[in-house]
Amino acid sequence: MGDAMVGVVANPLSGRDIRRLVTRASVFPTAEKANMIQRMLTAFHAVGVQRVLLGTDLGGISAAVCRAIGRRGGPGAGWPEVEFLDGQPIRQTAQDTVDAVRRMVAAGAHVIICLGGDGTARVTASAAGDVPMLALSTGTNNAFPAVREATIAGLAAGLVATGAVPAEGVVTRAKLLEVRAGDRAETALVDVAVSTQRHVGTRAVWDPATLTQLFCAFAEPDVIGLSSILGQLSPVARHEPHGVTARLDTQAPVQVLAPIAPGLVMPVGVRGIEPMRPGAVYPVDARAGIVAVDGERELTFEPGERPTVRLRGDGPRCVDVPAVLAASARLGLLRRTSPAPGPPPVARIGR
Amino acid sequence: MTETAERNALTREQLLSAYRMMRAIREFEERVHTEFATGEIPGFVHLYAGEEASAVGVCINLDDRDTIASTHRGHGHCIAKGVDVGEMMAEIYGRRTGSCHGKGGSMHIADLSKGMLGANGIVGGGPPLICGTALAAKIRGTRGVSVAFFGDGASNQGTTLEAMNLASVWNLPAIFVAENNGYAETTSSTWSVASDNIADRAAGFGMPGVIVDGFDFFAVHEAASEAITRARAGAGPTLLEMKFTRYFGHFEGDQQTYRAGEVEHARAELDCLKRFAARVTQTGELTRSGLDAIDAEVAATIDRAVAEAKAAPPPGEADLLTDVYVRY
């Protein structure tokens, strides 16, 4: 592929919600998000990506990358050409991510990388269509995005974007949870939780006592977030077709100690665990309250609205970073026998 | 319910009180905006309209043990901390019946009986003050907390950064509320704040820093409630960053050539009063007619405050030598 193109979108607000206060969640400074993108640019260049589309923001991330390009002596100095997706209103909401991802899809990006938490990955997935995505963690509740060095993620994305590693076997389709309440719909990549709280407030969920029901597309025993509740009781892997659901009740005889947020290991009462069948519609029991998707309170519902949850198999296509680099090793893609022409074998970030 | 859920659940009375205070601030500021144009009000005024959810969402968690320090844009903080609106209006008009006997004006309204340490013309003047009151509360064991409201401009001032450091090393019951309305006078915070998010600076002082949607009363209330509970329990200071837009210029008379379209968008789509009303009527917690009754009651109160302020006498010669020194 001679015109390999990668899109990168970073959420300027991820990693700053109330969990910094009520737990000991880490802060992810803007400067580090910008540094991650610069490390990716180095990796992209090393494997032959020629063009990068970068979402713009008012949080200072794209501005820092723009300054860094200027300090390096302008475009082309060891990094791919970077096109900033400006020229449209920045609302400082999730819509900015949607707008940027849609433009990347329309421009023909081969891979889209998103930096953020589960919420950012969910929003990116909603707009990415069939373009493979790679979610990197710069947020709090990270069951879906991986905590991974950006250079490695950049290499993997680049190898897929250039076609050096064929997508088959290294790009896999994730599951999706679809929530409907009246004419409103939301999706989740990891979990849907029902809370009896009345207001969205600070969005984050950190008090399990208000939760009454939980639906998980997958529930791994070693993740952080609400899906960890079922991850310890009835694990479901990402690649399995089914999901898992349960009712949460502080009085339930079965209690599990679950890491529902960074720094927060809480006892949660669980009963009625059952597998979620793909395609089947599961009604929400509560009469009124809030539905949280991927750990964020999102959808309020009133008596009579009765939301439903459905597990779908047609979620986003995701780049499996370890699988890409394993394929690269098998194919010898990063092997050099002598100093090669073209992209430098060693590229470094420098001022 | 757990302690956390109980803490963050608001009673009907609290919801009514929150709406009344937010509406009072809006009505007060819009009326001052109109009256200032007549030329009767001396000095400068800086209006708080648009930012009501911050003052009210924080102060509704406070009581008489607690103190707040404010800014040049202080009317909202005063009202939310319980300062009498009639006395405030008289103070703005420079009348003898004002909170400070007409000697301070808009930028110096203070009422120590309410724990309101004062509006403050010094940018970054408030944060050091609350280190003092928070230390006093800690030594006296009152479990009181102190809150400093300051803007994005003040977030770059040495006084603010020193105060956050001191609050952290002394482990004070202090809350730093950065009200980031996007502009320090006319300078955009996206240009002037090197860390981009003010909340990010908390990490450097070893305290939690949280970004809050400053247009959303419920988000502010929840974050402030957690920060204040934490401070009362002796767990130290917190930095909260409210992001929102002020509806009027930096001061009355500001031509606002540095921004376009933001205010219209915020008033139409994000307004804290509209969002609050839509939410509580949807859940059935309050009724539209109940909110309308508050609107009418508040409008009458502000009408009365303006009429009384205009009719009140200015300070006389004899007042020149009073309130000059404070006996400790």
Image: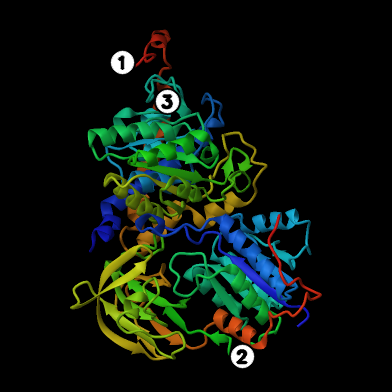
Q: CA distance from mark 3 to mark 2?
A: 74 Å
Q: CA distance from mark 1 to mark 2?
A: 81 Å
Please report, as a chain letter, where disc 3 is located: B
Q: Which residue is mark 2?
A: A168
Residue at screen point 53% across, 51% down: B197
Q: Chain of mark 2?
A: A
| Gap between marks 3 and 1 measured at Cα | 23 Å
| Residue appearing at x 43%, y 19% in the figure | B103
User: Which residue is identified by label 1?
Assistant: B327
Q: Is residue B325 visible?
A: yes
> Callout 2: 10 Å neighbours few (<14), some, many (20+)?
few
Say which element carries label 3. Answer: helix
- Decide: is A135 above or below B224: below
Q: Chain of mark 1?
A: B
Q: Earlier in the sequence, mark 3 or mark 1?
A: 3
User: In this view, which residue lies farthest toward the front?
Assistant: A338
| Dot in front, 3 or 1 | 1
The residue sitting at 27% across, 39% down in the picture is B144
Amino acid at pointer 3? Glu
Q: Position of residue A332 (x, y in %)?
A: 67, 85
